[in-house]
Amino acid sequence: MKNFIQKIKENYGLVLVVLIVGLLLGWIISPSGEAPSPIKPVMHDEHDHAEESTVWTCSMHPQVRTDKPGKCPICAMDLIPLATVESNQDATNPNDIVMTESATKLADIQTMVIRKGAAEKQIYLQGKVQADERNIAEITARFGGRIEKLFVNYTGQQVQEGEKLATIYSPELVTAQRELLETVKLKESRPSLYKASREKLKLWDLTDAQILSIENKGEPQTYFDILATISGTVMMRHVSVGDYVKTGQQLFQLINLKQLWVLFDAYESDLPWLKIGDPVKFTVQALPGKEFSGKVSYIDPFLNSNSRVAKVRLVVNNSKQTLKPEMFVNGIVESDKAENTNELLIPKSAVLWTGKRSVVYVKVPDTENPTFSFRDIKLGPETGNNYVISDGLNEGEEVAVNGVFKIDAAAQLQGLPSMMNPEGGVAPTNHQHGEMDMESMKQKSSGGEEHTMFKVSGNCEMCKDRIEEAALSVTGVIAAKWDADEQVVHLQYDQTKTSVDKVQQAIASVGHDTEKYNAPDSVYNELPECCLYRE
């Protein structure tokens, strides 16, 4: 300290100069001599209040509301201000569902413009090869007698038209020949009697050559040959040597197999797509690697009351006799719609089907954010991966073809018209900071009906059919739809007749785990390989 004071004394002049310079600078900066005013703090109260009053929500799950920005606890999307959603909805129909661009991308929503096109479909048919009924001949006895000789000894023997099949002795025929020989003498004076005798023999299948031979010989012929009326195969032999036959009795059945019928079974849903002249390609199980073709020549006007199918006939050339009657065949028909070939088509993936109603989501044009409108439509026949639209859509409208179920789920949560609730309803909003469970997503409707969702495990379309069929088998279930992506069943049921527990038990009993019940291992292990979902 003493050293410090000593140094000040030694440099007293320098210290005085520094002090004077400092006072001078202070006077220049503040000439009035007033002290600088203190810095006023910036007030953030109003801004903070505005920020705190902003409500944040999820564009996909509007029931999620919070006073802070962040991510949706359900889908992990960024929350957006509620005012943004409401401002978009102000400019649209209140029943339309508005989504953000990010929500649309996350849900993988894709759209397509509806156009007219050829309603074409591949129809798969099964059937059998049959004999052409027009080429079947029954050889019967034109007169009574005794079979003296057989030239056909077994079924399956090939014969030609005019070939001898058997020799018969007939007293009736001998008497008729004698009558002819008597009338030959009266040919000039009684020509009508002569003609009547000849006609009687011709009606008994005697040829003009045989009758002329009898006239030239002048005596009756004791034995007569039975001749084949067509070329073909002997399918039945009803007589043996020495048998006595009566007039009209069946002797042989002949079939010409050089031309055959192929008869396919067509179900009711296939008939609108089939018409005379449609080309058909078919294969035969017994002849792998070979493909045959033909054209539809006849469609049965009646359905079989038991099998509910109609017969569709093809006429096929079989000169090499490759095809055999009763062979099984599989056919494919490339057909357009029988009534009209220019139809309005919509992909199957765009349609939500409840069993009674078919609905789509139509994109509203000229909107700032993607907006979709719920629409009921009527479907016509199925055509490959498309449906024919009977009513409800116009050419040029744009519909969602992918992610449709997610749009419908968002509409249900907002209380807008949807697949399960076409009238709409109040959306549930009693959620704290986005917390949600399945029970809170229920929507009640009039008449004791209720809609709910629950988790069900599965893999493929076979799983979908099995799950929905099991749910619909429970009395009181109105509609059931399983979404493979979400692994969720949407269920509409009458709560006075059944419960969710009963439906879950029914689904578990066919091999699919639900939220509350696991499928028995014995049932699960019997599922097809593509349906096995457990790791």
Image: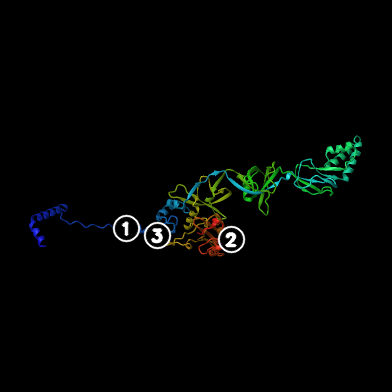
The residue tagged with tag 2: helix, strand or loop?
A: loop
Left-right relation of 229 to 453? right
Question: In the rendering, at what x and y percent does residue 474 appear?
Answer: 58, 62
Q: Which residue is mark 2?
A: 473
- Residue placed most toward the observer, 45 or 522: 522
Which is nearer the N-term, disc 2 or disc 1? 1
Name the amino acid type tagged 3.
Answer: Thr
The residue tagged with tag 1: helix, strand or loop?
A: helix
Crowd band around label 1 with a 10 angstrom C-alpha radius: few (<14), some (14–19), many (20+): few
Q: Which mark is residue 237?
A: none
Name the amino acid type tagged 1.
Answer: Glu
- Residue placed most toward the observer, 217 or 342: 217
Crowd band around label 2 with a 10 angstrom C-alpha radius: few (<14), some (14–19), many (20+): few
Left-right relation of 428 to 41? right
Q: Which residue is mark 3?
A: 66
Is residue 447 something that shows in the picture?
A: no
- Residue placed most toward the observer, 533 or 454: 533
The quadrant of the rendering that contains the N terminus is bottom left
Q: CA distance from mark 3 to mark 1?
A: 20 Å
